Amino acid sequence: MSGDRSHNEDQVDYASRVNDSHKHRDKYKDKEYKHKDHKKDREKSKHGNSDYKDMEKKYKEKEKMKHKDGSTDKHKDKHKEKRKEDKMKSLDGKIKKEKENGFASPPHVKHEPEDDYHLPKYEKSLKRERDDDYEAEFKPKKIKTENDKKVKKRKQEEDIKPKKTKSKKGEATDGKKKAKQEPEEKWKWWEEERYTDGVKWKFLEHKGPVFAPPYEPLPSNVKFYYDGKPMKLNPEAEEVATFFAKMLDHEYTTKDIFRKNFFKDWRKEMTAEEKSTISDLKKCDFSEMSDYFKAQSEARKAMTKEQKLKIKEENERLLQEYGFCIMDNHKERIANFRIEPPGLFRGRGDHPKMGMLKRRIRPQDIIINCSKDSKYPTPPPGTKWKEVRHDNKVTWLVSWTENIQGSIKYIMLNPSSRIKGEKDWQKYETARRLKKCVDRLRAQYREDWKSKEMRIRQRAVALYFIDKLALRAGNEKEEGETADTVGCCSLRVEHLKLYPENEGQEYVVEFDFLGKDSIRYYNRVPVEKRVFKNLQLFMENKEPDDDLFDRLNTSILNKHLQELMDGLTAKVFRTYNASITLQQQLKELTNAEDNIPAKILSYNRANRAVAILCNHQRAPPKTFEKSMQNLQTKIDAKKDQLSDAKRELKSAKADAKVRRDEKSKKAVETKRKAVQRIEEQLMKLEVQATDREENKQIALGTSKLNYLDPRISVAWCKKWGIPIEKIYNKTQREKFAWAIDMADKDYEF
DNA sequence: CACGCGACTTAGGATTCTAGGC
DNA sequence: GCCTAGAATCCTAAGTCGCGTG
């Protein structure tokens, strides 16, 4: 079998892995996670000369280590330190600059040179301009000649499939049109030409963002107390206090870092007087404020129908006005047109910045992106945008810089939009191209395990993990800026344990680390002997907090991958392995004789295998135990009902035997039907229970939305006559409209 | 050529909505 | 009709990756 992942079935049945691995964000460190101390050491060594010398010594020792292979020297730790210092400097500069720019200089509309990229003549045509490069496919830029044949072939396939464009139009127009006029026909962007060379649109018009509602001061009867005494805060400080008060029930507010960060930022909003009084967060009493907000939310729930409807209508109005944009002759839904309201930063895991004040975004923080010849969004009265630009090489409509990490946030389009959909489709096409050459790649990295160059061995082992275990690439992160999490390339020695033998298996590697969102990855896998030996080598003479792959980073890895296949990066493996697993599991698990609920259980199980592979976890719902119990009660009741029905059937039969008339025969039939019906109901419930139990701490949504080629699911539905609604809800159907339209029952990933 | 940053995808949790059971 | 569990949606943090720059 080519291109499947049968060489590592062990991935699929590791329900055991998930079992109690979720939510170890906090527990984790109590156990044996000692990284903190090492971190402190590293922190120290950054300053102070003697420490630096120690480092140098260590560095030299390392160099002596195993690298007799002549590979280029590289020491990640050293770079890390350097980077950090630089960043601190540049951050300083940035803050100062921001103050000068943001407030002093008037915001302005930036005018681009006339002949830039603006091509108004195209904008009226309904179809996008056809590109000069007819061969251009998903990856417009670099098309390798060796691929030309395949490209052409796929092109043809695509041209053949979409034909029913017109056919549906008739039925839809005279059909029942909903009160809110649908944006005429559903636009089948996937039947049109794509842009190449990085142009994302030619016309873009929108209304700009919706700002967070202004702060409403507390009523005078709701007081804040310091050290038992009521205290009126200035509005700014009061607002920040309310952010804390609203989170009082949340675990966050018990965490030291959170409290420390909050308090520090809160004090910045206080008057000199307030600052001098309020010196200890423990003496702050927010409970009255907290109660007030609870009462408010209760009141909101208790509102009358009309009031609720009014709010709903207002929301709808806002959505209609700001929730859409015009991009290239089509009205498209915007994903997040509301600006993030101010509040306290809720970083995940052990985030050093949790609790910091996320400041309010104002019009002068906002950059607008739209066509030059569009009607620009107007800033709120008396305000100005930071900038209006016309960059059609990007997809965002609005951006601003956030104050916690200094990163940029964007307003972009909905997943159902052309611009997102095309990219998504393209992603799966890249993964399918990987399928075609994955055997070759696997052979290659296995060969590379034997390389005499350390960097190549490391690269090959890392790639093996990424492929086999679906690990993320693992970019380096700045210490102290974010939670300490890792991916493949950033794994440290402390994250794995090697067992030459474990529970009857040879060469077992135990992984235990925090990945994205501080979700714990725990897995014990037998690996090939060569991998094991290499790992031993990589770990020799290293401290627990040293990088496992000291001669590798994501950039090196991705450059290598790019050479192996056009468009290949580490994350493509996740997409590929997820999709191919789904396809295989569906094939394996779907039983032709099963009824629809049972088939859907199979689908969910296939989906689950992928979620486990990708380590998509969730906190077990708070009500999980209870709801499980409820379900069990229902099942028991149904069982009783069934035995009753069976008894009745039996007596009806006996009766019929004696009486031998039509009427009693009919009664038997009725009873038989009843038994059958109840049996079906019982089965449905039992299936539901199984499904739910198996899903306790596994999240299916993420893989469904981001990793599974929707055409696989669509094909499966078509093949088995399962309504697509059973698999995808409305939003998902919108996102995957392209797949639903184009995949037939024989689609192969 | 490292490195910072911009753009975009992926992610889990919180909040809101809704359908189905009482 | 009401309540509530579970689904849907919203929210925004946290990744990936490529590119420009000094």
Image (tube, coloured by chain):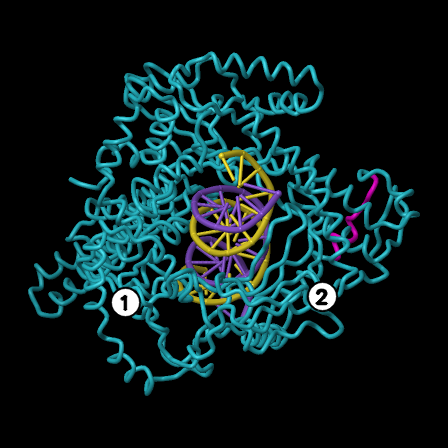
Chain colours: A cyan, B yellow, C purple
Seen at 65% across and 18% down, the residue is: A52
- Chain identifier of the residue bearing label 1 in the image: A
Tag 1 secondary structure: helix
| Vertical relation: A258 (above or below) A344 | above
Which badge, 1 or 2, is on the more N-terminal residue? Answer: 2
Seen at 48% across and 29% down, the residue is: A513
* Left or right of A145, for residue A542: right
Residue A640 visible in the picture: no
| Vertical relation: A63 (above or below) A1 | above
- As drawn, the residue found furthest toward the bottom would be A174
The residue nearer to you, when weighing A290 against A65, is A65
- Identified by mark 1, the residue type is Asp
Q: Residues within 10 Å of mark 2 (few under 14, many from 20)?
A: many
Query: Disc 1 versus disc 2: distance between alpha carbons?
Result: 46 Å
Which label number is shown at residue A444? none
Task: Report x, y in % for residue A391.
Answer: 53, 64
Dividing the picture into quadrants, the one containing residue A589 is top left
Task: Report x, y in % for residue A132.
Answer: 32, 67
Magenta highlight range = A283-292
Residue A285 visible in the picture: yes
| Vertical relation: A318 (above or below) A706 | below
* The stretch drawn in magenta includes residue A464: no
What residue is disc 2 on?
A: A107
Task: Report x, y in % for residue A27.
Answer: 56, 30
Tag 2 secondary structure: loop
Which marked residue is nearer to the observer: mark 1 or mark 2? Answer: 2
What residue is disc 1 on?
A: A741
Task: Report x, y in % for residue A354.
Answer: 66, 41
Query: Which corner quadrant holds the N terminus of chain A?
Result: top left
